[in-house]
Amino acid sequence: MSEERSILVYDQYRKAEEKFDYFVIGVAAALFAYVGQHLQAERLGANSYTIQVASMLFLIASVAAGFQRIQKGVTAIRTSHLMLEDQTMIARFRAATTASATTITRNELTGEVLDHAKMAREIERLQESVRMHKRVLDMFSNRLSTFYKIRNITLYIGFLGLLVAKIIGPYIDTSQ
């Protein structure tokens, strides 16, 4: 019962996290489009236009980091699925090995006939696959965290830059 609730809560967390990622990317992309639509070309220099252009670059970086975060998240979910499948197969092979008094067992999924030696080799191969999936998941976990930080920092810088450009615009002489 507790395990089911834990899975349910994690599923809700994952869905909320995905929706938030989509929302943040949408806000950054919409802000970029709005500013880009209303931006009139000027010379780069010590003016608000330069701050706006730099801010737009930060917004694009935020969108790109957000897309990377989503992509890595989807790949991490797929890798988790593959790891769980391998762990399930290990459990099935172990159960078949201990339950079978004979030395030959049939794989229920594929119909292949396996002896205990083949099952032992298959278990070892699957265990190595699980170890590889765990390494990949650790790598993706670090990358997801990095892209999360990059997305948020570049979004904040881009937004603050646009705000600063609007505030200081009237105070800077643009006729230079």
Image (tube, rainbow, N blue to C red):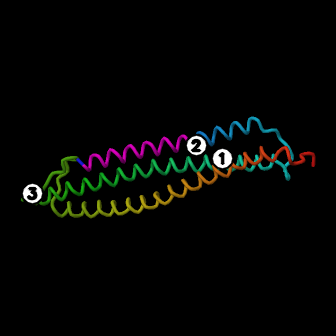
Instruction: Indicate the position of residue 41 as horizontal and vertical percent values.
Output: 83, 41
For this rendering, which residue is in front, 31 or 82?
31
Inspect the image, locate mark 2, and give the three-letter code of the amino acid beneath it.
Ile
Total marks placed: 3
Mark 2 or 3, which is nearer the eye?
2
For this rendering, which residue is in front, 118 or 67?
67
State the SS at label 3.
Answer: loop
What's the residue at 24%, 57% (across, down)?
Answer: 90
Displayed quadrant of residue 128 = bottom left
Q: Residue furthest left?
A: 101
Q: Are marks 2 and 1 in contact (CB under 8 Å)?
A: no
State the SS at label 1.
Answer: helix
Instruction: Indicate the position of residue 172 as horizontal and vertical percent values.
Output: 87, 48
- The residue wearing badge 3 is 100
Instruction: Indicate the position of residue 54 as horizontal and vertical percent values.
Output: 74, 50
What's the residue at 62%, 49% (across, down)?
Answer: 62
| Sooner in the amino-acid sequence: mark 2 or mark 3 | 2
Question: Marks 2 and 3, how far apart in space?
Answer: 54 Å
Question: Marks 3 and 1, how far apart in space?
Answer: 60 Å
- Give the magenta range: 2-23
- The residue wearing badge 2 is 25
For this rendering, which residue is in front, 13 or 123?
13
Q: Does residue 7 show up magenta in the picture?
A: yes
For this rendering, which residue is in front, 18 or 114?
18
- The residue wearing badge 1 is 60
Mark 3 or 1, which is nearer the eye?
1
Inspect the image, locate mark 3, and give the three-letter code of the amino acid beneath it.
Ser
What's the residue at 29%, 55% (across, down)?
Answer: 86
Instruction: Indicate the position of residue 132 as horizontal and vertical percent values.
Output: 38, 62
